[in-house]
Amino acid sequence: MLSSLGFIIGTTLMYSTPLLFTSLGGVVSENSGVVNIGLEGMMTFGAFMAATVGYFTGNPWLGFLSGGLGAGFLGLLHAIACVSFGASQVVSGIAINFLGPGLALFLSRKFFDGATMTYTLSIEMKMPKYFNHILPEGTFIRQVLNQDITVFMVFSLVFVIWFVLYRTRLGLRIRAVGEHPKAADTLGVNVYRIRYLCVIFSGVFAGFGGAAMSIAVASNFFQTLISGQGFIALAAMIFGKWKPQGAMIACLIFGAAQAMVIFIGGTALRVPNEFLSMMPYVLTLVILMGFVGKAVAPAADGIPYIKDES
Amino acid sequence: MGMTFFSILIAFFMSGIILFVAGYDPLQVYRVMIEGVFGRPKYISWVIIKSTPLIITGLSVAFAFRTGLFNIGAEGQFMMGSTIAALLGYFLHLPPLIHIPLVFFAGALAGGLWGGIAGFLKSRFGIHEVISTIMLNWIAFYGHNFVVSIPGFARRTNISFNIQDSASIILLRNWKFSEAGRAWFADHPFWKDILKTPVNGGILVAVILVLVTWYILNRTTLGYRLRAVGFNRDAAEFGGISVPRSIVLSMFIAGMLGGAAGSLQVMGVASNLSTIAAMEGYGFDGIAIALIGNNTAFGCLFAGLLFGALKFGGAKIQSPPVRAPMEIINIMIGTIVFFIAMPRLLKMFNKWRQKKGRAENA
């Protein structure tokens, strides 16, 4: 019983992590007033970059960082379009969702002999599990905490983002820019700079999410590795009412549903796999229906801000 | 309009640079692509076959956009349509004159319900359609894969039985392989080439749907009302339009289009269902098509054909002698959409040119 519980909790944490990184990217961008529907593309590109750089350097940390930087570059493109050129943010995000996977697969074929998957990383080339040798075998604690380092990183990041957004001047400025850019501008906040910063970081976090998938959960990048997780992360952010702690809870629910699918699949219960896999999505809709009050986005979310040119 | 062509030009240019940097000859790649689209009669019919579902999912997204809704769910609506079409196409035995329209409309209706659910969830519970359609896509995805495995419907693992001939819209489906057909083809190589592909009636339906969508949006009270809700919800409400009903109806119609695309794909091309490992992207491509087509019905027709051509011609560049990754197509599409997102760019450019002109005249 306890070991089943341990398995479920451990697996939940593992599967929540890539989603949560990406979802936090969404939180950062949208709190500054820029809708980021391109998370999926950024996550895919980050996953590819991490697996590729990780493979060629043999260093997972360099890989992880490159995943963030690669996706951060897509974030920069999104920022240039949305912040400097007043682009439709949804449209630009859709473009990113074509560009990210397009670039990832193009480069993959170039670097890996025409294959749309990178070579498998050996265990030393993946993100480390620091507690592997410390935690005693076969215990509940081990099942829960014997995780990739990325798991601990992402939950720390939730706290950091919460702290920055709600306890610092920078956070106040970010939220001001997301709620009422004109007022913020009048008070001397550089709206453009704040939005650039947030959108680029949004890409970086989504890239970390992809990296957490390709070099921690899995051992390589392949065409269907991300397939839709960026969109789930987007939904989790809305579900979590645009707050880091809300996104965390939403991602944990998705992760738990995934863990249940794997757990029940391993038991004697004969439930068709497809119904189990469907559950998290049905559940999300049911929970959202039960929500009292609507989820409210930052007031200026999605509206380009163009300074008067006089 | 200007922006679209401008974006397409930039996309070809940028992709050319990427190809060049990656060590390919862009001109050679483009030549192979163009030959891959227009080179043989067979290629052209493949492009049309590939474009058919994309034109319709594009219409689905565009219709929703015009009424102020973002339909990410065309993907799921498509899968609902194809699933129901495949089931009814296999299990029912009817004369073609009844079977074909029945299967088509049942698939469209299934997609419509799927879209309608998203509309209902928005109007009744305030759930944003972006979330609900993402969820519904996944539910449809797993539902589709479940149906493929139903005993009695599964022909073998991961693939279902073919639909009955009476539900197929592939032209001359049986005649093509008959003695008479083969004999006739021996004398008519042009037609042989074209009919080697699953040429089907889908494109005619797609063109009809383009006209119907245009008509509903621009020439009916219903279209006017739905657009009014999209344009200004409060003003529409004040003008006596029921906003919740309009939202459900908009999503229902958009969903029907998505479902129709799915029906036609089963009836005209696939003839069966097979297990899918990841979303196939018909609906997501539809989003890009709607955007490239400026959310108009005729724009979707054009953009859908462009998409079909890029996808079919693009696949050709992977073979020797070029051996360039076909994913350059996705980069190209991404670039087109990226520049379409920035209409201000063209305006700024014109302004700058005017300024420069003035400075020179002074």
Image: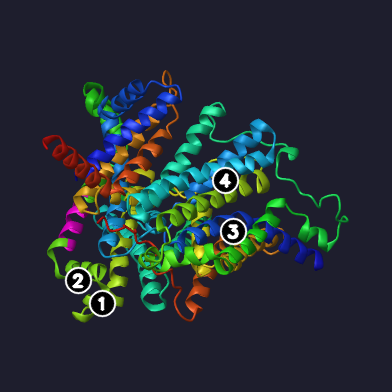
> What separation in Å lies between label 1 and label 3 (alpha carbons)?
36 Å
Mark sitting earlier along the chain (3/4): 3
Q: Are marks 2 and 4 on the same chain?
A: no
- Front position among marks 2 and 4: 4
Q: Choose top left, top right, bottom left or bottom right for residue B90.
A: bottom left
Q: Which residue is pictured at 35% across the width and 33% down the height?
A: B14
Identity of the amino acid at label 3? Leu
Identity of the amino acid at label 1? Asp
Q: Which residue is mark 1?
A: B234
Quick one: SS at disc 3? helix
Q: Nearer the viewer, residue A134 or B100?
A: A134
Q: Magenta stretch: give its range.
A: B207-217
Is residue A227 visible from the viewing direction of this image? Answer: no
Quick one: SS at disc 2? helix
Q: Nearer the viewer, residue A277 or A16?
A: A16
Figure check: B182 above or below B160: above
Q: Which residue is mark 3?
A: A20
Q: Are marks 1 and 3 on the same chain?
A: no
Identity of the amino acid at label 2? Arg
Mark sitting earlier along the chain (2/1): 2
> What separation in Å lies between label 3 and label 2 (alpha carbons)?
40 Å
> What separation in Å lies between label 2 and label 4 (alpha carbons)?
46 Å
> What separation in Å lies between label 3 and label 4 (alpha carbons)?
14 Å
Identify the subunit bearing mark 3.
A
Q: Which residue is mark 2?
A: B225
| Quadrant in which the N terminus of chain A appears | bottom right
Q: Does B216 lie within the magenta span? A: yes
Identity of the amino acid at label 4? Gly
